[in-house]
């Protein structure tokens, strides 16, 4: 009988321990609510961080695009940077930036202009017709304009405007 009393006492103590009091239930509800609030705050912070990162990445990509585009165009201009080597030509879809290269074998032109939504570069013998199909695409852009003011060339594309300072004197002759 004693073993039965001991077993009964153990089982009833176990059963009593499983019962939750109101205080314990409210404590658990508070803990769960607090964890839910922290989780929601964490997810909101994560979403805000992702949106901030996305916008910073877009700005950085835009800056990289204009840096690449301006670098390609500026390098082409600097290679041909001689006295009166920069001219304005007439491309198939508007103005063309013509960079002259005078060699012992003749005069050659590097022509930079807009064609079918791209800025293209074509290398040809001076005075020949434009052949845009042979031109190499430098960058996509529906806009291409430039001005030559003394020794400062300002180029405008879809990515924005940038300046190229020429080292040689330019007459700014137009064709």
Image: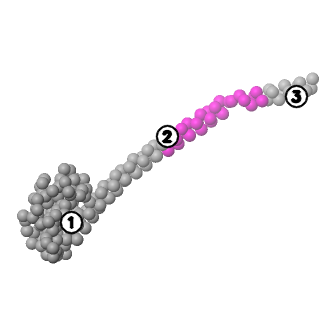
Q: Is residue 34 magenta?
A: yes
Q: Residue at x 56, y 40 (%)?
A: 35
Report the magenta residues as a range: 14-42
How many angstroms separate mark 1 from mark 2 (CA)?
49 Å
Asked if residue 171 is positioned above or below residue 37 in the image, the reply reads: below
Q: Earlier in the sequence, mark 3 or mark 2?
A: 3
Residue 14 x %, y %: 78, 30
Q: Would residue 122 be visible to someone looking at this image? A: yes
- Quadrant of the frame with the N terminus: top right
**How many callouts does the rendering have?**
3
Q: Residue at x 13, y 58 (%)?
A: 130
Say which element carries label 3.
helix
For residue 40, the mark is: 2
Q: Mark 1 against mark 3, which lies toward the viewer?
A: 1
Residue 33 x %, y %: 55, 36
Q: Is residue 37 left or right of residue 141?
A: right
User: Front-most of 23 and 34?
Assistant: 34
How many angstroms separate mark 1 from mark 3 (CA)?
95 Å
Q: Earlier in the sequence, mark 1 or mark 3?
A: 3
Asked if residue 83 is positioned above or below residue 131 in the image, the reply reads: below
């Amino acid at each position: 009988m004693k073993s039965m009393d001991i077993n009964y006492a153990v089982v009833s103590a176990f059963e009593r321990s499983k019962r939750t009091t109101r205080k314990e239930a409210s404590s658990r509800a508070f803990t769960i609510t607090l964890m839910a609030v922290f989780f929601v705050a964490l997810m909101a912070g994560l979403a805000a961080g992702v949106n901030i990162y996305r916008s910073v990445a877009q700005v950085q990509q835009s800056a990289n695009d204009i840096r690449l585009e301006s670098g390609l165009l500026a390098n082409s201009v600097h290679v041909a940077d001689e006295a009166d080597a920069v001219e304005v030509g007439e491309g198939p879809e508007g103005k063309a930036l013509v960079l002259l290269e005078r060699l012992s074998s003749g005069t050659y032109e590097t022509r930079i202009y807009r064609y079918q939504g791209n800025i293209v570069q074509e290398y040809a013998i001076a005075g020949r017709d434009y052949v845009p199909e042979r031109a190499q695409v430098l960058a996509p852009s529906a806009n291409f304009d430039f001005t030559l003011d003394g020794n400062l060339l300002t180029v405008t594309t879809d990515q924005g405007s940038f300046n190229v300072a020429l080292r040689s004197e330019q007459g700014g002759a137009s064709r």
